[in-house]
Image (cartoon, rainbow, N blue to C red):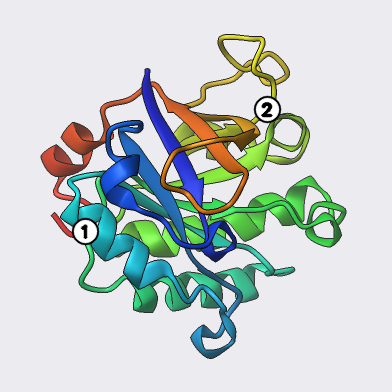
Amino acid sequence: MLKGIDISYHNGEIDFSKVKSQVDFVIMRAGYGTELAKSKEVKFDIYYEEAKKNNIQVGTYWYCYATTPEEALQEARTLLNKVKGKKFEYPVFYDIEEKNILNTGKENVSNIMRAFLEEVEKNGYLVGIYCSANYLRNLVDDEIKNKYEIWVAEWNRNIDKPTKYQGKWDIWQYTSDGHIDGVQSQRVDLDFSNKNYEEIVKAKGKNGY
């Protein structure tokens, strides 16, 4: 499996020249919410340029605050505006973990996901969802899990694959307290990918390629 990290501005300064010898890919947060002006993802462009300069494969994600499909559609359009002109070897993921959203139930959560994913997909991106194993199991329609890329969070360094979620998965976030030389923060999320996404993305002409 390929090794990666996922990052946001909370991880501080990152020396990608050091990071590149330790990981195969980096998934970075592009932002959150429906308005670019209110997103504090101030390091996205810097992270992107530095990762590319150091030949690290890049993916991105958008953090969900949408409570309705209509708001999710607006988040998708905001994301598309933020990533215009960039190329990603890894998918564009929708990160859903806010309790007030998850507590609205399976039908609404799935409809929120579907609205975002369909909009980003039709604009030429390979897309997927990020969710914990428990919520993936209980709050996401099988249609979504079968159709889109799955990035599952289950923090356990003592296993070699997710155990709380038995369905298809493509990336596994296996800890939130990893350490990577070159990342300023004391903790960083660590991931495994079981797909060669660069090959898939380029073959399909997705994500700006």
Residue at position x 21%, y 55% from top? 52
Between disc 1 and disc 2, whose residue precedes? Answer: 1
- Relative horizontal placement of residue 121, taking residue 147 as reference (left or right): left
Q: Quadrant of residue 194?
A: top left
Where does the C terminus fall, quadrant-wise? bottom left
- Relative horizontal placement of residue 104, taking residue 53 as reference (left or right): right
Which residue is at the front of the view, 79 or 50? Answer: 50
Amino acid type assigned to the residue bearing label 2 in the image: Glu
Residue at position x 17%, y 33% from top? 199
52 over 187 or under it: above or below = below
Residue 190 rendering spot, x and y as whole percentages = 53, 34
Count residues near mark 1 (Cα–Cα under 10 Å), then give few for <14, some for 14-19, many for 20+. Answer: some
**Residue identifier under label 1:** 87
Tag 2, which secondary structure? loop
Amino acid type assigned to the residue bearing label 1 in the image: Lys
Q: Quadrant of residue 159?
A: top right
Q: Is residue 104 visible?
A: yes
- Relative horizontal placement of residue 9, taking residue 133 as reference (left or right): left
Residue at position x 45%, y 62% from top? 13
Where does the N terminus fall, quadrant-wise? top left
Q: CA distance from mark 1 to mark 2?
A: 28 Å
Q: Is residue 142 visible?
A: no
**Residue identifier under label 2:** 154
- Relative horizontal placement of residue 50, taking residue 70 as reference (left or right): left
145 over 42 or under it: above or below = above
Q: Quadrant of residue 85?
A: bottom left
Residue 68 rendering spot, x and y as whole percentages = 71, 69
